[in-house]
Image (spheres, helix red, strand yellow):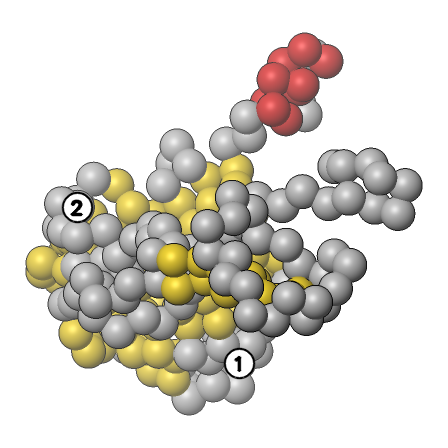
C-alpha cells in the first residue's frame, strides 16, 4: 500500500474499508464503506448488495445521506436497454440523463436505461431517497429446528442444542422460518450457519 508501513498495512488488513460483495463468474462487486460507494460488473443478470441488474452492465452507486447517484453503462455495447433495481425507497428525481426512465420509486427503485447506440457511455441519475424507510434487509432467526436420522426414525430431535449432519447414521437437518411479517415478496435470501466439524481423527475446527 502506498505510503503505509508494515503496521499500518496490517491494521488496514484487519479492518479494510473495502468489502467484497461478490466475486463470482456472474457478478464482481466491491463496496467502500466510508464513502458509501458500490462498484459492480454484472457479466450476467444478478445481485450485488442492494443492486439487482437484469442485464449485463457496469454500475457505480454512491449513497450520501438522502441522495443516491447511479451511473450505468453497457461495456458489451450489445444491449438495447438495461433494467436496474435498487432496494431503496425513492422520494424524488434530482436529475437524470434523457436515456434513463424511472419505472417506480417505491417499495424500491427501478430504472431502465436505453443503451442502444450509446457505445458504452455512462448514463446517470440522481435521486433523493428516504434513509429512514424500512431496511430492505431483514435478519430472521429460525422459528423451529430439528434433525432426523435413519437409525432412530421415530425420535424427535427438536430439543437438541445442535443440528447434526452426516454423522454416523444418515441424518438430515431442518430449519423453519416464519415469513408472515415480511412486508413484500422476497427476491434474495442467504443462510448463515455456525458449524463445528469433527474429522476422522476426532479433531474439531
Classed neighbour count for the residue bearing mark 1: other residues with Cα under 10 Å, few (<14), some (14–19), many (≥20): some
Whether residue 59 is visible, yes or no, is no
Per the image, the residue denoted by label 2 is 131
How many tags in the picture? 2
Q: Residue at x 55, y 70 (%)?
A: 154
- Where is residue 109? Give x, y as percent: 22, 67
Q: Position of residue 147 (x, y in %)?
A: 55, 62
Task: Give the residue at mark 1.
Answer: 77
Residue, x 14% and y 51% (percent of image)? 133
Q: Residue at x 46, y 50 (%)?
A: 159
* Residue 7 horizontal side relative to residue 19, left or right: right
Q: Residues within 10 Å of mark 2 (few under 14, many from 20)?
A: some
In the rendered image of this protein, does residue 88 appear above or below residue 36? Answer: below
Label 2 residue SS: loop
First in sequence, mark 1 or 2: give its number.
1
Residue 179: quarter of image:
bottom left
> As rendered, which of 122 and 103 lies closer to the eye?
103
Is label 1 in a helix, a strand or a loop? Answer: loop
The answer to whether residue 126 is left or right of residue 7 is: left
Tell me the CA gap for discs 1 and 2.
34 Å
Relative side of 163 to 55, left or right: right
Amino acid at each position: 500500500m502506498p505510503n503505509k508501513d508494515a503496521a499500518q498495512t496490517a491494521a488496514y488488513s484487519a479492518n479494510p474499508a473495502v468489502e467484497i460483495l461478490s466475486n463470482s463468474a456472474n457478478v464482481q462487486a466491491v463496496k467502500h464503506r466510508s464513502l458509501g460507494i458500490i462498484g459492480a460488473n454484472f457479466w450476467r443478470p444478478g445481485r450485488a448488495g442492494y443492486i439487482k441488474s437484469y442485464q449485463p452492465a457496469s454500475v457505480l452507486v454512491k449513497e450520501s445521506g438522502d441522495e443516491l447517484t447511479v451511473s450505468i453503462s453497457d461495456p458489451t455495447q450489445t444491449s438495447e436497454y438495461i433494467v436496474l433495481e435498487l432496494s431503496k425507497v425513492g422520494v424524488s428525481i434530482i436529475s437524470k440523463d434523457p436515456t434513463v426512465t424511472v419505472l417506480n420509486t417505491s417499495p424500491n427503485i427501478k430504472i431502465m436505461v436505453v443503451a442502444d447506440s450509446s457505445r458504452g457511455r455512462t448514463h446517470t441519475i440522481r435521486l433523493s431517497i428516504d434513509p429512514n424507510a424500512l431496511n430492505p434487509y431483514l435478519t430472521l432467526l429460525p422459528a423451529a429446528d430439528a434433525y432426523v436420522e435413519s437409525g432412530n426414525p421415530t425420535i424427535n430431535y427438536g430439543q437438541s442444542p445442535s443440528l447434526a449432519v452426516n454423522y454416523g447414521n444418515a441424518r438430515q437437518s431442518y430449519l423453519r422460518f416464519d415469513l408472515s411479517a415480511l412486508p413484500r415478496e422476497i427476491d434474495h435470501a442467504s443462510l448463515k450457519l455456525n458449524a463445528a466439524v469433527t474429522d476422522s481423527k476426532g479433531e474439531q475446527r
